[in-house]
Every structure is written in C-alpha cells, then in structure tokens.
Image: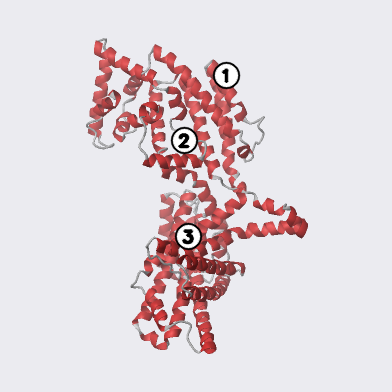
Amino acid sequence: MWVREALLWIGQDISHPGDDAGIARAHARVRFLLQLAARGTTAGQTVGRLLAQLLEEVDLEQLATDAGIPRRSGFVKELYERILAAFLPRPDYRHDPTALGASLLGHPHTMAWIDLLPGEQAGQLAQLFVDEGSREHVRPQLASAMLTVASEAQAVGLAQEVRRRFSNQSAITSPFGQLVGAVEAFVAAPDAERQSALNGTIDDCQKLLATLEAHFDEAGVSVDLVYRSERTRAQLQKLRIVAQWLVGEEPLHVLRQVMNAVRSELGLRGIRALVSENMRLLSRRIAERNAETGEHYIATTRAQYRTMLGISVGGGALMTLAVYLKFGITAAHLPLLWEGVLASVNYAGVFVLVALAHFTVATKQPAVTAPALVAKMRDLHRPGRVEALVGEAAALVRSQVASVLGNLVAVAPCALGIAALWWFATGQAPLSEEKARYVLHSQSVLGPSFLFATYTGVLLWLSGLFSGWADNAFTLRRLHEAIATNRRLVRRLGAEGARARADWWKENVAGLAGNIGLGVLLGLTPALFLFAGVPMEVRHVTLSTGQVAVAGFTLGTGILTTAPFWLAFAGLALIGALNVGVSFALALRLAMRAVDISAADRRLVYQGIRHRLFSRPLDFIWPPRDAAGSPMPEEAR
C-alpha cells in the first residue's frame, strides 16, 4: 500500500524513537512533501488528491466509533477476543479502518516523528487530507458515529445493574437518558451553543459515572461493571472530541488526537493491560479487606505480644493433628488423586478448626498483615508519618516472630507427646526407621526444600486472595441480605436468629474461604503436579517441624548428634523464612499496586526501616517498654 511505503520512506533513517538525527531527516522529508503539494505542478496536485481521496475511501464512521475504545460490551467477551487475536492470524486491514490506522501509524518510529513534528508543519500536513469535497463526505459520517457512541453509552448508563449503584438511580432524571437527545440536537445544527449544551450533558454523565466506584465498597466490585464503566467513560470523551471536530477544530489538534487514539488502540491489543486495569478495583478491595483482617495480627504492646504468643501456641498444638493425619494418609498408599483429596480435607479441616478456636497459624498472617501496612502508606510527607510507619513495620515483624515461635514451641512438644503415648500404647514408634530417615532427608537444607518452601509461600499468598475474593463475592451477591431474609431460616430461628446467622457468615466467610482454599492448594496441587510428571511438594514450617519432631522420636536421642538432623533443623529455618518472606513480599507488592503507592514513597519507607533495623534491631523482636497502643500517633494518621 502506497501510504505504508510513504511512511516507511519518511522514517527510514530513524533507528530508535530517541534518534534525534533520524527524526530531523524525517521532518526534512515531510517539508519536501509539503512544498511539493503546495506547488501547482502536476506532482503537487497528485499528492493532494491522493491524500484527500484516502480520507474519502476510509470508513470514518467506524474509525470514529471504535478507535481507542474496547469493541465488546462485556469484559469476558473482550478478554476472549484478545486471547484469540494473540494467536490467530490477523484479517485484512483494509476491511477494518481502525486496525488499518493503528497498523500504519502505530510503528514506534512513525509515532516518534509525528509527535515531534513542529506545529506549523503538523497543521499543514493534516490540512492536506481535507478539501471542500472531503468535508461534505466527513460530516455525515462523524455525525452518525456520534449517534452510535451516544446510544451505546446511554444503554450502559440506564442499565438496571448500573443505575442501582449510582447516586442518582432514576432513569427519568439521569443525564444518560438525555444523552442521545443532546447529540441529535447538536448534529442537526452543530454550533457553539448546542455544543455547550452537549458538553454539559456529557459532564453530568461523567460525574454520575464517577459515583459508581464509590458504591463498590458497600456493594462489592464487579469486574464486568468496571470494564463497562471504563468503556463508557472513553465513549463520553470521544463524543466531546468528535463534537469539536464538527464545530471546527484546528487540523493540528485533530492530528494530535488521532495519534492519541492510535496509542489507545495499540493498548487495547494487550491481554495484560485489560486484566490489570479492570482488576485494579478488585485488587484494591481484596487488599483493603485483608488489611482489616491483618490489623488483628499486629502486636504493638507487650500485652498484645503475649496474647499473640498464646494464640499461636494454640494454633501450633492443633496443627499436630494435621501432622499425624498426613502420616496416616501417606501410609494408606491410596491412589494419587484420592491421597491429594484426603490431604486437602485434612489441611482445610485443621485450618478451619484453628480459625474457629480463634487461634492462629503464623504463615497465614503475612498475606493479610502486608496490606495492613500498605493501607497506612499515605501522606508520608506529613511530619512524623514515616517514623510512625516504621514503628508499624517493626510491630508487624515482631508479631510474625511471636507467631512463628508460638507455633513451633507448641507443635514440636505436642508431636513428641503423642509419639510417646503411641509408644506406650503400642510398644513401637509412630514411624518406621526408613520413613523417619526419609523425613529428615526431605527437610534438609541441602535438598530442594527451598524450592518447595517458596512454592508454599505462593500458596499462602493465594489463600489471602481467596479470602478477599470471597468477601467481595459475598457482598456483590448480597448474600447477607439473602440469608437474613430466608423464609426457612426466619421460620426456624426467628428474624433475629436469621440476622445473627447472616452476621456470622459476613464475619467469617473470608476466613473460611482462605483456610479451605489453602488446604486444597496444599493438599491437591502436589498431586496435580505429579500427574504432569513434576515432583512438586509443599513445605509448611509448622507441619515440617512436627514431622521432624516425630522422626527424631522414632530415631532416638542419638540422632541429635548426626548431620542429617542438623541439616533438617537448618532446613526448617529456611522453610520458615521463605514461607513468611515470599507470602509477605507478594501481598505487599499487590497491595502497593492496588492503592497506588508511588516509588518515591516506597523508597522513604524502605530507608526508614533500614535505619531502624541498624539503630534499634531489638524493636523487630520484642516490643519496647514504652510501647502503648498503636505506634501510629493521632497527628500522623
């Protein structure tokens, strides 16, 4: 196609988008074309005629309707189409002017010289595409595009599932109900007065659309609604731009707006961009929900520290059940799938039991305590804010230390106690010598335990996502209201009893989902990996400590003087660090991205933490004597 060849000729000397010398030579070629077109020669008239003809042949209605805006009306359909487009051959661009424009103008070298083209030359270049004949051809297509865009935006704005989340829920008084009428009035006689009226309606629609996000907190985040609102917001902006074109926009501004649309169109091709943008609010809600939970696991005083130790000891004691049940499941030599299913039931059941008993398992905390820390990373320029936040970080770390210590201090003696009872009752140790030596070898710091512990840290982080997702789904589906008003429950428990049951589920659904999800991940995913021929295992520090304790009892006190035992002991330390560290790092990163913490603010926090670590390292292990209440002073909040 001659246009593509012309663009390649103009930018042929540009080696990269920052090549100033190449861009200057491209601008020189543009000046040559402009000078050629300005002459009355046959060649100059041919250039002008070809450019004007190009504008007449392109379907401007489709270009103005779709360029820079997602095509499909729903998130799932858009995601499906982008996945297909990533693998299937692309169709002929000549039948899709939007894709054609992105293909011609979307090359980085072409965008570089157009963006840096001096204003006068850019205006002259844009003017070449428009003559008296093309204007008459362009206006009806732009007007038709405005009506199409307005109709789609109005349909979304008046949809019942969208309106019930607006501050103004009436279809009669909604500005979206007036949008198509305002566009019709404008395209009938495009002038400044009608344009002002149209812009006023668009402003009202944008303000109403902005209230949608505020209602996500109380009504739950729907990814599909987020996608539709972002698409509608882009359509409203498109109406404003095209209206200005019809009234009379400077050619230079038109060219700049076209290039912005090309950039948006290129961005629409990526799967990652679609998912990250539309998952942003859901990620924020998950982070905020986990932050609320994480507040309960940060000990800021010595009394809270002792309480944390106590509930961790209880959690470690109950985890002994999971240790012995796992040994029993393995000894049964069941088919791989059923072994994974029973292991999932074992882990999930014990985790739920720990949660219902109001105990804690240390490795589950980082997924919720990290968002709690990020939630306070705001306004760090205010006096005392960074220092207070560093104090919060120190409290978080020592809370983790207390939790891990409490779990391990309990699980090892309890495992040894049950092993002693087993020996007294049966006259033999719970494990065979071969199995006990295998347990020590599997936990060794020299083996693949670091890889398995890292994988387990990822699973612990995923369980935090399950918690937030379940809480959001519970709210989005209005299950609290459904349970509280269920006729059978009301008849059996009474109105107050049904509401109490609904309140219980509201308070516990996130924890139950996270614990059950973690149990399934720990128990079933290793079996699925083995189906694929990948020998993946899990290494959870509390479970591994219990297993090592049982193996040590089986092998006797002599094992304490051997290298395998101390290699396994070192492996336990590495497993604990990786479980907590990986889970915390992933949760911290997700929470920072969800609440838009800037890189500069992150650096301030990291510097403050390093300074506290070197100046007062004990703050990260034991609460200071003068710690009282939250380390976040009121004036720094």
Going from N to C along the chain, the mark reached first, 2 or 1, is: 2
Decide if residue 627 is in sight here. Answer: no
Q: Amino acid at mark 3?
A: Trp
Numbered-mark total: 3
Q: Up-down: is 68 above or below 292?
A: above
C-alpha distance separating marks 2 and 1: 27 Å
Q: Earlier in the sequence, mark 3 or mark 2?
A: 2
List x then y, in percent, for residue 6.
26, 25
Name the secondary structure under disc 1: helix
Asked whether the beta carbons under mark 3 and mark 2 sit within 8 Å of each other, the answer is no
Where is residue 531? Give x, y as percent: 41, 62
**Which residue is the site of mark 2?**
70
Closer to the chain start, of discs 1 and 3, is: 1
The label on residue 185 is 1
**Element type at mark 2:** loop
Residue located 44% across and 13% down the image = 136
Q: Rate crowding at label 1 as few (under 14), some (14 to 19) or many (20 or more) other CA atoms within 10 Å.
A: some
Q: Which mark is residue 559?
A: none
x, y (%) of residue 401? Answer: 48, 70
Q: Distance of mark 1 from mark 3, alpha carbons?
A: 54 Å
Mark 1 belongs to which amino acid? Answer: Ala
Label 2 environment density (alpha carbons within 10 Å; few <14, some 14–19, many ≥20): many
Residue occupying the point 65% across, 52% down: 479
Q: Mark 3 sits on what residue?
A: 461
Q: Amino acid at mark 2?
A: Pro
